[in-house]
Image: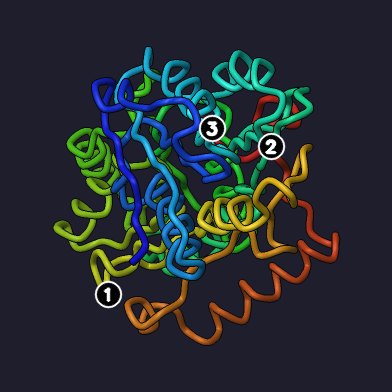
Amino acid sequence: MTLVKKFLGAVAAVGLTAGAASAEPALMYDLGGKFDKSFNEAAYNGAKRWAEETGMSYREIEVTAEPQRVEFATRLAEAGFNPIVVLGFQNAATVEEVAPKYPDTSFAIIDVSWLDIPNLQQISFAEHEGSYLVGMLAAMASESGTIGFVGGMDVPLIRHFGCGYAQGAKAVNPDINIVANMTGTTPTAWNDPVKGGELTKAQISQGADVVYAAAGGTGVGVLQTAADEGILSIGVDSNQNYLHPGQVLTSMLKRVDQAVYDVFAAGVEGFEPGVRVMGLENEGVGYALDEFNAALITPEMQEAVDAAKASIIAGDTEVVAYYTNDSCPVLEF
């Protein structure tokens, strides 16, 4: 039986000893909780799938406070876990400090692409491409002509989501109104479902009848409030359609699960440092269609979105990245 080893918090982390699990992989979650039904949980699902398929075990740890980042990553390396997958752009400084001290340990980080560390694989996603597709669906589903976007922490990454979403919506309806709000400017913005619900109600009062949440655990509150108020929502990262069947229009899939699975599967021998980008072309992002939202997506909507996907992959349709010039041509935040 596969043993998934857990240690939550600093007390348990102290219990790690050098050489405890040589060549066993490890996963370090970002703030927001392992079961956030979004980003962190997607990573967990990838690690779990690897463990179930191989019968092997891995170590996982949840960061619950900023000071734990470097401490936990260091203890994993000291204990001999390899490779070590670290989640989130906020851990860029963590791997910058820890990875060079352990050159024989392979590290991977999700949502980072700008570091120069020889034993690090950096995995980034073309979130704007997937968001473009769900923006198209939002515009096609909207009856009011106003749609919403609720982001988590106000950082370029989340603006990247929102910018793609707005471009997709405008491609369908150039006159559509898009209301955008960020939850906050600190990491707590990733796990504030109450605030997410409040922002959703505010957007509904402005006419929004479809709201896209790109906010980690905060998005659970967005989806819940949208369902309670009788409008449609769009999930993110993981497939969240099941949370409110018939009320979640779709989910923008960000295959963090596949990224973690691939690193674990490659192991130490197959590890490749450098930058890996996951987008529409390699199924790194996309939109979810299943039994929970099939009635909401008409054949015409699916045909239009799939044609746009093909056009983006072929290079005929350009989705402008927020990162290009720190601005979005069709949306003000």
Amino acid under disc 1: Gly
Q: CA distance from mark 3 to mark 2?
A: 21 Å
- From the viewer's perspective, is 149 left or right of 304? left
Quadrant of the rendered image containing residue 265: bottom right
- Residue 174 seen in this snapshot: no
Please identify the residue farthest to the front as the structure is shown.
19
Q: Please identify the quadrant where the N terminus is shown.
A: bottom left
Amino acid under disc 3: Gly
Amino acid under disc 2: Gln
Between disc 1 and disc 2, the foreground one is: 2
Above or below, comparing residue 252 to residue 94 in the picture: below
Give the number of callouts: 3
Residue under label 1, please give it: 246
Mark nearer the N terminus (3 vs 1): 3
Residue under label 2, please give it: 122
Give coordinates of residue 268: x percent, y percent.
68, 45
- From the viewer's perspective, is 177 left or right of 190? right
Which of the two residues, 139 or 151, is positioned nearer the viewer here?
A: 151
Q: Residue at x 75, y 31 (%)?
A: 324
The colour style of the image is: rainbow
Between disc 3 and disc 1, the foreground one is: 3
